[in-house]
Amino acid sequence: MSTDVRRLIEFYKSPLGKISRTLVRDDVTQLAGNVRGQRVLGLGFATPYMRFALGPAERVLAFMPARQGASAWPREGPSHTVLCDPMDMPLTDSAVDLIIAVHALEHIADAEELMRELWRIAAPNARLIVVVPRRRGLWAQFDNTPFGDGNPYSRPQLERLLREHSFIPEQWREALYLPPSQRNIVLKSTRLIEGFGRMFMPMFSGVMVVSAKKALFPAVPRRKKTERFVRIPALSPQAAMELPPER
């Protein structure tokens, strides 16, 4: 099930959404490193985590699935948003150097086909940063946030998916140990809860953030799309209609 773009926008405007964006964005920024001169692509609803790339990157694009809907981003200047089919993105082979996928992988019906498409558009030695809800985490158990929608992943599942499609995981991060609650007592204790969770409960984070590098050769070739036969009706010539004489 895809999350509606309006729900995503409302969540990231809420106090809990702002805090979760800050916590996850720190990990995404660290894993991305220096993006100067690179071509950066955000997939799903990655725009809350991509502002750091607007200045130094050569080009920044935000692809949003058609079923989800799109919103203009950034608020200032020309929009970088493209509404498209994630399985058939309007890019040439080896077009981008860094892909940031947030609210994407867990909403795709065919994750394997998406991984093949990501491998196609990724340049040699390109990196892929994926943020997905963790199966054991509290955020995957409640549907009051977008991280509760779709199919959560365990670490072995995500690692296997990446490796089987020629992306080699290099670095892992965990975030969102705080409960997915808008209560003030939870929001004010964010740093304390996050620090305690990272130290004593690393297996129960709300989301996983992984950075993977593209391997040289594809492990699984892309599926061939079946050609669809479209019947075009035959056009037979018709006699011109004569207008009735004027009276």
Image (tube, grey):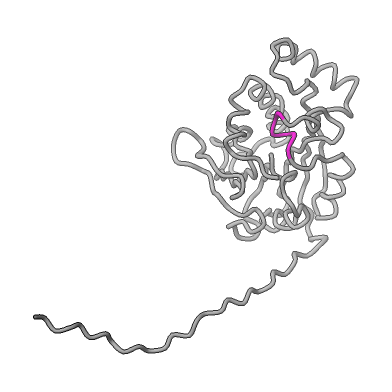
State the residue in front, 124 or 179.
179
Q: In x, y percent, where is residue 244?
A: 18, 83
> Is residue 146 in the magenta section?
yes
> Is residue 120 in the magenta section?
no
Q: Which residues are magenta?
A: 144-149
Q: Residue at left 73%, top 41%?
A: 129
Residue 170 picture quarter = top right
Outermost residue toward the left?
247
- The relative height of residue 20 versus residue 215 in the rendered view (above or below) is above
Q: Residue at left 69%, top 72%?
A: 226
State the residue in front, 91 or 7.
7
- The relative height of residue 160 versus residue 178 in the rendered view (above or below) is below
Q: Residue at left 82%, top 35%?
A: 134
Q: In x, y percent, where is residue 168?
A: 82, 48
Q: Residue at left 83%, top 30%?
A: 137
Q: In x, y percent, where is residue 191?
A: 75, 15
Q: In x, y percent, where is residue 173?
A: 80, 32
